[in-house]
């Protein structure tokens, strides 16, 4: 056992010996759901236990209703730590410092402090305060049955991997099987948790890349649509130019002329109309307009001969 761990135990134990409490606590708000009583001990915490059962024994679910977690200890892990500490020189020195304190009381305080140091939390979102309003007795029963299995297998060292594995989609039963001593006492669970985390991260990366591909595809579609629109506009313009080119010049001096023409390019057609006037042998003027699918083109020209 490390000196740092022993020092932590001793400091906590001394504090436990010096603590004194007095006065009565106000009654907590309770709610009965199925076979269970939910006792709200603080705005963010609650105890859940079978109705009629003591609310101070080890079968009570200690819940943080803000985070939706249950606080647990693994008795085998804690007992092993207590046994190891009691064999240490630090434990003997501690007893010698307080010879008037019964050994039973010292052991109780040491056990409590070691238990707190090995306490861990299991994620149970269904026990968040918002969900407790509509939780059913069957749901609490399922949670309680699972917790009985969890605290027999999961330790403070494997709790993080268990939570991560379940968060990644592994069932609680599979995570507990991976964490059992028969499968390496947590090594397999850690590997499953690591692989699951990598898969989750890769999935997120794929989803992110998919969104980027969708954005690129949308932009590409916009460009392709713009290219098609430009091509259609070019064909209409070519048809209008062909139609304008077909308009006749004014030939007779002192007379107006009206002219019309049809032009086309690829699958587009345009109609053009125009007027002209020849002032004399040397001077003439004309104007024309062409239309195709809502687009129009026009021209105006003057001719001088000398």
Image (cartoon, rainbow, N blue to C red):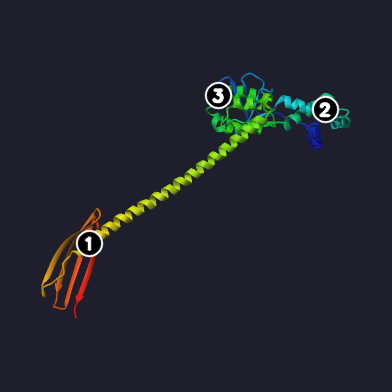
What residue would you read off at disc 3?
Answer: 139
Alpha-carbon span between mark 3 and mark 2: 41 Å
Residue situated in front as seen by the camera: 47 or 93: 93
Dot 1: within a 10 Å radius of its alpha carbon, few (fewer than 14), some, or many (20 or more) residues? many
Q: Residue at x 64, y 27 (%)?
A: 178
Q: Residue at x 56, y 37 (%)?
A: 200
Q: Residue furthest front?
A: 266
- Residue 266 is situated, as x and y percent measured from the top left of the image, at 25, 54
Q: Earlier in the sequence, mark 3 or mark 1?
A: 3
At mark 2, the secondary structure is: helix
- Residue 197 is situated, as x and y percent measured from the top left of the image, at 59, 37
Is label 1 or label 2 in front?
1
Residue 296 appears anywhere in the view: yes
Is label 3 or label 2 in front?
2
Q: Earlier in the sequence, mark 1 or mark 2?
A: 2
Residue 130, above or below 223: above
Where residue 234 sits, quadrant-wise, is: bottom left
- Residue 301 is situated, as x and y percent measured from the top left of the image, at 21, 71
Q: Earlier in the sequence, mark 3 or mark 2?
A: 2
- Residue 155 is situated, as x and y percent measured from the top left of the image, at 69, 29
Residue situated in front as seen by the camera: 10 or 169: 169
At mark 1, the secondary structure is: helix
Q: Residue furthest bottom?
A: 306
Q: Residue at x 50, y 41 (%)?
A: 207
Where residue 231 sits, quadrant-wise, is: bottom left
At mark 3, the secondary structure is: helix
What residue would you read off at disc 2?
Answer: 86
Residue 217, above or below 8: below
Left or right of 294, for residue 196: right
What residue would you read off at disc 1?
Answer: 242
Residue 227, above or below 280: above
Q: Are marks 1 and 2 in contact (CB under 8 Å)?
A: no
């Amino acid at each position: 056992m490390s000196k740092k761990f022993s020092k932590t135990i001793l400091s906590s134990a001394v504090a436990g010996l010096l603590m004194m409490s007095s006065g009565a606590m106000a009654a907590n708000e309770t709610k009965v759901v199925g076979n269970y009583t939910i006792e709200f001990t603080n705005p963010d915490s609650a105890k859940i236990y079978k109705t009629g059962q003591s609310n101070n024994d080890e079968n009570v679910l200690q819940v943080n209703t803000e985070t939706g977690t249950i606080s647990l200890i693994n008795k085998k892990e804690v007992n092993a730590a207590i046994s190891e500490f009691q064999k240490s020189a630090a434990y003997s020195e501690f007893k010698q410092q307080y010879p008037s304190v019964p050994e039973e009381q010292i052991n109780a305080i040491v056990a409590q402090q070691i238990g707190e140091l090995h306490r861990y939390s299991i994620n149970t979102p269904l026990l968040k305060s918002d969900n407790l309003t509509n939780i059913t007795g069957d749901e609490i029963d399922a949670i309680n049955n699972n917790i009985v299995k969890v605290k027999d297998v999961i330790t403070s060292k494997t709790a993080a991997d268990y939570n991560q594995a379940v968060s990644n989609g592994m069932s609680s039963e599979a995570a507990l099987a991976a964490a059992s001593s028969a499968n390496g006492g947590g090594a397999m669970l850690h590997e499953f948790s690591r692989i699951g985390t990598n898969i989750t991260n890769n999935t997120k990366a794929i989803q992110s890349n998919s969104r980027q591909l969708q954005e690129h595809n949308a932009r590409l579609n916009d460009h392709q649509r713009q290219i098609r629109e430009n091509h259609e506009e070019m064909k209409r313009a070519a048809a209008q130019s062909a139609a304008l080119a077909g308009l006749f010049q004014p030939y007779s001096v002192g007379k107006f002329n009206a002219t019309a023409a049809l032009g086309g390019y690829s699958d587009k057609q345009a109609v053009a109309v125009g007027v002209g006037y020849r002032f004399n042998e040397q001077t003439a003027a004309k104007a024309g307009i062409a239309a195709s699918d809502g687009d129009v083109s026009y021209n105006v020209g003057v001719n001088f001969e000398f």
